[in-house]
Amino acid sequence: MSIAAIALASLYRTVGQSSKGVMDVESRIEAALVARSALASSTFAEDAERQLSGASGEWHWHVEMHAEQIPLREQDGRPVPGEPLRAAKVTVYVTRGKEGPTVMTWTTWKPYRSTP
């Protein structure tokens, strides 16, 4: 009887840890979808500046942007003559709840239509 109790306790713990792992993966997938949606809502940096935060259900996100000048280069590394590309480094932070810990961080570049 005691051997069966030990075996069942181990099985119960294993199943509990597996279901927690599944919930963690599902949370990361949902957070990634929220981040992707926030980034996809704008093509240019000016568009991303219009909505720097938002919420989708229990998920909250906010955007940080940093304008940069990016020199263009050929495939062999030679610089391309002319003006550098004006772009913003856009980072989206996704949290569960308004003050929760960051679950997902995604970074991309968005070009400016005009001078920042």
Image (cartoon, rainbow, N blue to C red):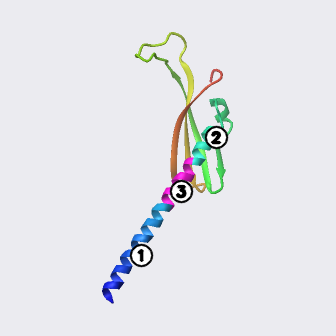
Horizontal and vertical percent for residue 28? Answer: 51, 53
Numbered disc in front, either 1 or 2: 1
Identify the secondary structure beneath mark 1. helix
Q: Is residue 31 magenta?
A: yes
Task: Identify whether 10 is placed above or below 42.
Answer: below
Q: Which residue is mark 2?
A: 52
Quadrant in the rendering for residue 93 = top right
The mark that comes first in sequence, 3 or 1, is 1
Type of residue at label 2?
Leu
Type of residue at label 1?
Tyr
The extreme bottom residue here reads 1
Point 65% across, 21% down: residue = 114
Quadrant in the rendering for residue 96 = bottom right
Compute the Cα span from label 3 to label 2: 22 Å
Q: Which residue is mark 3?
A: 27
Identify the secondary structure beneath mark 2. loop
The mark that comes first in sequence, 1 or 2, is 1
Quadrant in the rendering for residue 77 = top left
Compute the Cα span from label 1 to label 2: 44 Å
Q: Is residue 111 magenta?
A: no
The mark that comes first in sequence, 3 or 2, is 3
Q: Which residues make up the magenta segment?
A: 23-32
| Quadrant of image for the N terminus | bottom left
Task: Identify whether 1 is placed above or below 29.
Answer: below
Horizontal and vertical percent for residue 86? Answer: 57, 22
Q: Which residue is mark 1?
A: 12
